[in-house]
Image: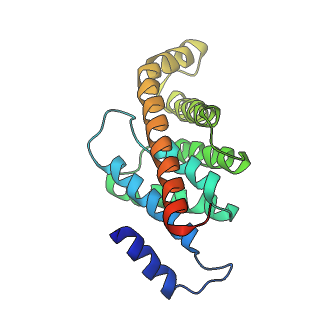
Amino acid sequence: MELIEILLFLQKITPMSNTYLSKKQLVIIVFMLVAILFRLMPHLPNFTPITAIALFGGLYFTNKSMAYLVPVFIMVLSDLFLGFHSISIFVYAAFLLVSFIGTQTKKPSVFTILLSSIGFFIITNFGVWLLSYPKNLTGFIECYTLAIPFFRNSLLGDFFYSGLMIFGFNFVQKKYLNLA
């Protein structure tokens, strides 16, 4: 209940117009911020809410620029603690693709989550191949083959965190915000 009280307080002090945050937008941002905390905690390799955050933002922000900017900002915020890497540009590109998938989707589905996971996998591992493997077919195949075990954890994390965020948001929306 404390989270809802904080959101209502923030909403009271934030003027309502197109340039400011609505209750719904505040709830979406809080869900993303809470989710990113799981990225900062110890976890199985690639079992993180990264893809879920980008998809969630794309699905639920009505302001499409926020659907891209807020998830990227939250990702940058967590990377300040975790560090930036040579493939970060590919991670951010994949993140934007997943946000795009969310903005083009009418409602969340297993297919949408799977498509987001596959897109993230393809883009990020392309970056790994470009930066760390021989630039030939053998290097390309080796890179993606060695990434398959990590993809399993990514899929599990994507489905887990997407489900948690989507069902959690729908519950809060119906119970507390009357926005459904």
Q: Which of the 4 quarters of the picture holds residue 5?
A: bottom left
In the image, residue 16 above or below residue 63: below
Indicate the position of residue 14 as horizontal and vertical percent values. 53, 84
84 and 17: which is toward the camera: 17
Toward the viewer: 25 or 119? Answer: 25
In the figure, is residue 165 to the left or right of 2? Answer: right
| Left or right: 3, with 73 as reference point | left
Nearer to the camera, 55 or 179 = 179
On screen, 28 above or below 49?
below
Task: Please identify the residue farthest to the top as the structure is shown.
Answer: 138
Residue in view at x 62 percent, y 64 percent: 66
Residue 137, given in percent of the width and then of the height, sits at 60, 14
x and y percentages locating residue 38 in the rendered image: 34, 48
Q: Is residue 61 left or right of residue 29?
A: right
The residue sitting at 61% across, 34% down in the picture is: 119
Q: Is residue 105 visible?
A: yes
Number of disc labels = 0
Left or right of 156, for residue 63: right
